[in-house]
Image (cartoon, rainbow, N blue to C red):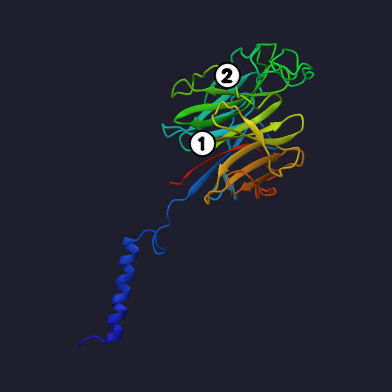
Amino acid sequence: MRPSRRRRRTVVATLTLALAGMLAPGTATAEPTATDRYTMVAFSNTSARVMDVYESRNGTDFTPLKLGAYRPASGFVRDPSIFRHTDGMYYLTHTTADGANIGFARSVDRLTWTPMASWPVPLCCALLPGTGDGKGPVNPLGINGSAGFRDGPSLSPFTTKAWAPEWFIDNGRVHLILSMSTGGGFVPYLLTALDSSLERWSWPVPLDGLRADRIDTTVVKAGSTYHAFTKNETKKVIEHAIAPALRGPYSFVAPGPWGTLVEGPAVTQLPNGDWRLYLDAYKAGKYLYSDSSDGMNTWSPVKELPGVSGTVRHFGVLRESAP
């Protein structure tokens, strides 16, 4: 007995759907494709000695991946920054608050961390332009680089504080952006890894144009332009500067509507291509964010970061493709 025309159409439709499910993994009938994954490393309001790890798929909604993921044997794990190296491992750097020593650790899975040797920042910077603390009087002669003036170099070679290290990868080379002080205000410096082990570093070099009394500097590259976001310690605001090269010279541009009493900027790119700036409103006890859809020229009004605001402090964010 021959099947009816309606029955034949039903069988063909069923086979077509089954084949579509096998041959078109991007369709609704297949497994979802990989998406971006954002890893946040942060210390908290309750402890600067313990680092927590969070995860998000959109850069907005973060959930705990592992609380208490890392605790150094001594000292702090403030201002953590994370990146994934060419060896496949995740590397952490952080403020130890132990003089001029930078902390390091590494992990295979972002959950379990192994401490690495701290890096003691060497004596440096005496009489180098742009290394002064920004606290002295303005040179009445209008000449930059006169020791003892606000725009002059440091008179001391002794680095007393090395804070807020930030990873920056450029053309395959691993760098650190570091805030250093020789007794007064902080100055942003650049250090470059001398080998893939990340255990030897170059002599610190000041970032040209950012000037003294800046801290918590982070840099991102968009196209051929380098964007630096840094906290002006005198005014307690986040400033935005751009440069044609990583070392500068940087020139300041109009900042976004980020308000005052903010620090710890972190920048990432969202799945839709927009840029996001995270800010630690440390006095208000909140974490904020602001977005740019036009290549970091203009920024949206700040919003409070849901879920983790009021808990996390000065964090680092790593964006990568989810496995």
Up-down relation of residue 90 to residue 272 (above or below):
above
Res. 76 image quadrant: top right
Measured as percent of width and height from the top left, residue 323 is found at 43, 46
For the residues labelled 2 and 1, say whether their Cβ atoms are less than 8 Å apart: no
- Depth check, front residue: 167 or 254: 254
Three-letter code, disc 2? Pro
Quick one: quadrant of the N terminus? bottom left
The residue pinned by badge 1 equals 224
- Residue 171 lies left or right of residue 213; in this view the side is left
Q: Residues within 10 Å of mark 1 (few under 14, many from 20)?
A: few
Which residue is depicted at the point 55% across and 26% down? 176
Measured as percent of width and height from the top left, residue 163 is found at 64, 25
Three-letter code, disc 1? Ser
As measured in the structure, the alpha-carbon distance from the residue carrying label 2 to the one carrying label 1 is: 24 Å
Q: Which mark is residue 202?
A: none
Mark 1 secondary-structure assignment: loop
The residue pinned by badge 2 equals 204
Measured as percent of width and height from the top left, residue 258 is found at 71, 43
Up-down relation of residue 193 to residue 90 (above or below):
above
State whether residue 210 appears in this view.
Answer: yes
Which residue is depicted at the point 35% across and 64% down? 21
Q: Nearer the viewer, mark 2 or mark 1?
A: 1
- Depth check, front residue: 198 or 253: 253
